[in-house]
Image (cartoon, rainbow, N blue to C red):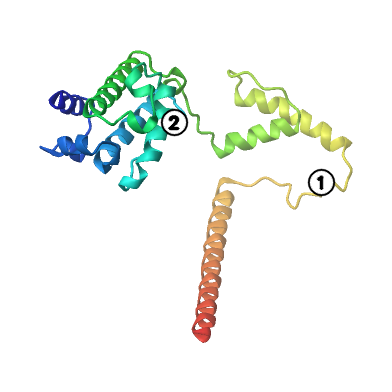
Amino acid sequence: MENDILDGLEDIGYTGPLLEEGLLEKALDGGPKSVEYTGLVEWLSKELKILCKLDEHVNAVTSAEDSSSFLLELSSFLKELGCAYSSLMEGHVSERLHTRENRILLLNFLLTELEAARMINVNKPDLSKTMEVQLNESSTANDLKTMLIALRFPKPPANITSSLLFGKVEPKVKEILDNASPRLVGKPLFVGVLSGKQWHQLSEIQNELQEEYRMRREMLIKRLDVTIQSFQASTD
């Protein structure tokens, strides 16, 4: 029976320490008081919790004194899992893993349940996850959506062109401006038309200003760091 358990553990991808020769035998001897045995039960229960969407799982013991809490958690977990073995579900909780046979039975039950859960998960995948599509919205698209919401436009059709969309937006904006208070929108600083060369010059000026502001910001942050360090040094 122990060899069957080892084969089953390898089949499901278990890579823990109990695959080494003799360690499973020792873990079975310790049962609910063994860190290794309860650790294996914990691993199996967590795998089942994910696949079967359960609320419970079992925590391994850190010492023999924790065995009573382990057995209580195991009882709740098996009940939620629907275990039908009377030797694991009936009688006093402290006596259910009293024999070596029941300890082996528990591992066999958890292994077969995990294998079945994985097969079901492969044959019937969660379509809500596999069909999930994430759309990354650009800043331009986000600004456009915000503008349409502010103007109380209905959602435009997916096949609308940009020229047609802005053709509808422009008269709406003009209508709002005509009816708005003069204080709402100030007078524009510039109403002329720039050439391509002038736009290029403006872009270069903007880049230079941004670089200057970046250097000033870094300098101020550095000064703040030095000031804080000096305060800390004076209090030491």
- In the rendered image of this protein, does residue 213 appear above or below residue 226? above
Residue 152: quarter of image: top right
Residue 9 location, x and y as percent?
A: 21, 28
State the residue at coordinates (59%, 51%). Answer: 198
User: Residue 157 in the image: x percent, y percent?
Assistant: 63, 18
| 235 vs 169, nearest the viewer | 235
Q: For label 2, count other residues whose C-alpha is less than 10 Å away and answer few (under 14), some (14-19) or many (20+).
A: some
- Place of residue 67 in the rendered image (x, y in percent of width and height, measured from the top left): 35, 41
User: Residue 85 falls in which quadrant of the image?
Assistant: top left
| Whole-number angstrom distance, CA of label 1 to CA of label 2 | 61 Å
Which residue is at a point 51% across and 68% down the rendered structure image? 218
Image quadrant where one finds the N terminus: top left
CB within 8 Å, label 1 to label 2? no
Q: Secondary structure beneath disc 2? A: loop
Identify the residue at image location x=29%, y=21%: 109
Q: Give 196 or 215, whichever is nearer the viewer.
A: 215
Residue 16 can be seen in this image: yes
* Quadrant of the rendered image containing residue 143: top right
The residue where tag 2 is placed is: 56
Q: Nearer the viewer, residue 121 or 165?
A: 121
Residue bearing the label numbered 1: 185
For residue 161, the mark is none
- Residue type indicated by callout 2: Glu
Which residue is more in the foreground, 125 or 102?
Answer: 102
